[in-house]
């Protein structure tokens, strides 16, 4: 239930901020927003400014509302929000308050606003995380305050003793003891971890692990003969700490980090597309809403600052994906406007609407496929059966 709640909040923030961008820029460009809703219908209640009564008027339920002003609504399905913009489907081109009646540059600004708002949200969340304190590799001259230093696992090799023990990336190596002396050793630095593992090759050891706030004891045997670059246990680890910065430095770190993450995501997408073109394995592991929800629950257990970073990364992903020139996405709608400018006349409304419908159907099909794959991959079908 906790995982579901956190996932709903995270998804709600991402979608709401995206739609808020469209709403604000539409209003600033003189386009009427007929309704701006938090959550998805059916409507719980709403309110709007009544020109006749010169006051805010409250509306209960989903009954039809006739007003020239924006209806602000709260809806039953708490998964983000929506904005209903007049003329967004190409109608009422002669109305000065219609989206379709505005110049191309105004329409592009309105469509791009959602993407930009998601990126701004990511920069704000990263900045807040750097101000609170984010887990970082301990380095000299970082300029921030450090606390809670610990040794964390950065990578676990496939088919290694560490993987067989159940060690996961992000685990804290707190201490260990061997099966012979039974002496408990608390790890103070990287050299102590390395010495403990290397001195006990071929012997059963017990590692004290902290996974978030959960203490664990995992048992395994370091290899006497290991592949190059893996080590006896098959893990790489670093010394990390919570590093916090003054507010002005936190903003700088948050903004620059958001751009670095965006560049990494874009370059990864480009590499995947190129591999598909040259018919090489894409090396892509896609997660749908179910997979992201499970991952959200795992991140939430690590702490608030991890949720901030995770939400920021999802926001950048949402921004980049929405910018793709695919029909039904913001980038696809912008593409049709650019085609209109190049050819000197609007694209057939019927053709454009059909393209968006096809694009939407393909996206939904992809989501259904990925969701089914997540259910099978995460063994969630069997877990659901045990509940019912």
Image: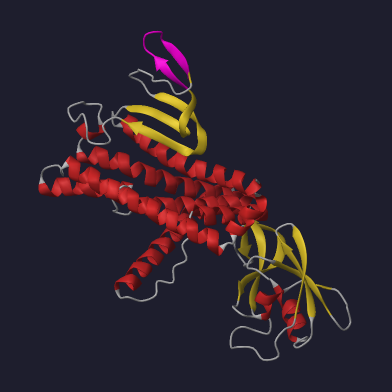
Asked if residue 252 shows in the view, the reply is no
Using the rendered view, name the quadrant where residue 150 is placed: bottom right
Residue 119 in the image: above or below residue 170: above
Q: Is residue 221 magenta?
A: no
Residue 130 in the image: above or below residue 98: below
Asked if residue 267 shows in the view, the reply is yes
Q: 18 or 353, which is in the foreground?
A: 353
Of helix, strand and loop, which mostly describes the magenta segment? strand
Q: 105 or 89, which is in the foreground?
A: 89
- Range shown magenta: 46-59
Using the rendered view, name the quadrant where residue 91 is placed: top left
Q: Is residue 52 magenta?
A: yes
Q: Is residue 315 left or right of residue 277?
A: right
Residue 162 in the image: above or below residue 1: below
Q: Who's the residue at 38% across and 34% down the image?
A: 83
Q: Position of residue 339 (x, y in %)?
A: 17, 49
Q: Position of residue 74 (x, y in %)?
A: 49, 28
Q: Is residue 154 left or right of residue 50?
A: right
Q: 75 or 127, which is in the foreground?
A: 75
Q: Who's the residue at 36% across and 50% down the image?
A: 322
Q: Position of residue 167 (x, y in %)?
A: 68, 71
Q: Position of residue 70 (x, y in %)?
A: 38, 24
């Amino acid at each position: 239930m906790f995982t579901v709640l956190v996932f709903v909040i995270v998804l709600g923030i991402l979608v709401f901020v995206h739609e808020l961008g469209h709403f604000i820029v539409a209003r600033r460009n003189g386009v009427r927003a007929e309704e701006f809703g938090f959550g998805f219908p059916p409507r719980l209640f709403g309110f709007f400014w009544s020109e006749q009564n010169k006051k805010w008027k409250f509306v209960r339920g989903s009954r039809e509302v006739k007003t020239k002003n924006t209806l602000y609504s709260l809806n039953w399905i708490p998964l983000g929000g929506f904005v209903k913009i007049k003329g967004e489907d190409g109608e009422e081109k002669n109305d000065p308050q219609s989206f379709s009646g505005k110049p191309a540059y105004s329409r592009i600004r309105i469509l791009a606003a959602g993407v930009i708002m998601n990126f701004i949200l990511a920069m704000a969340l990263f900045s807040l995380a750097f101000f609170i304190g984010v887990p970082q590799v301990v380095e000299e001259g970082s300029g921030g305050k450090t606390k809670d230093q610990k040794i964390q696992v950065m990578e676990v090799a496939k088919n290694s003793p560490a993987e067989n023990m159940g060690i996961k990336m992000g685990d804290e190596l707190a201490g260990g003891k061997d099966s012979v002396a039974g002496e408990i050793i608390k790890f103070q630095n990287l050299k102590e971890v390395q010495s403990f593992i290397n001195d006990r090759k071929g012997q059963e050891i017990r590692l004290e692990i902290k996974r978030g706030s959960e203490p664990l004891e995992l048992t395994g045997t370091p290899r006497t003969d290991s592949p190059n670059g893996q080590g006896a246990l098959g893990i790489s680890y670093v010394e990390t700490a919570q590093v916090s910065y003054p507010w002005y430095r936190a903003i700088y770190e948050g903004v620059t980090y958001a751009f670095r993450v965006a560049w990494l995501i874009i370059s990864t997408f480009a590499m995947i597309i190129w591999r598909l073109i040259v018919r090489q394995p894409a090396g892509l592991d896609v997660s749908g809403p179910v997979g992201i929800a499970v991952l959200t629950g795992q991140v939430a257990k690590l702490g608030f600052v991890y949720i901030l970073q995770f939400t920021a990364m999802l926001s950048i992903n949402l921004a980049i994906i929405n910018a793709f020139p695919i029909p039904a996405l913001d980038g696809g709608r912008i593409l049709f406007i650019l085609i209109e400018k190049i050819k000197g006349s609007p694209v057939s409304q019927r053709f454009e609407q059909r393209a968006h419908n096809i694009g939407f159907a393909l996206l939904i099909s992809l989501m259904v496929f990925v969701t089914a794959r997540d259910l099978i991959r995460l063994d969630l079908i069997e877990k659901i059966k045990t509940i019912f």
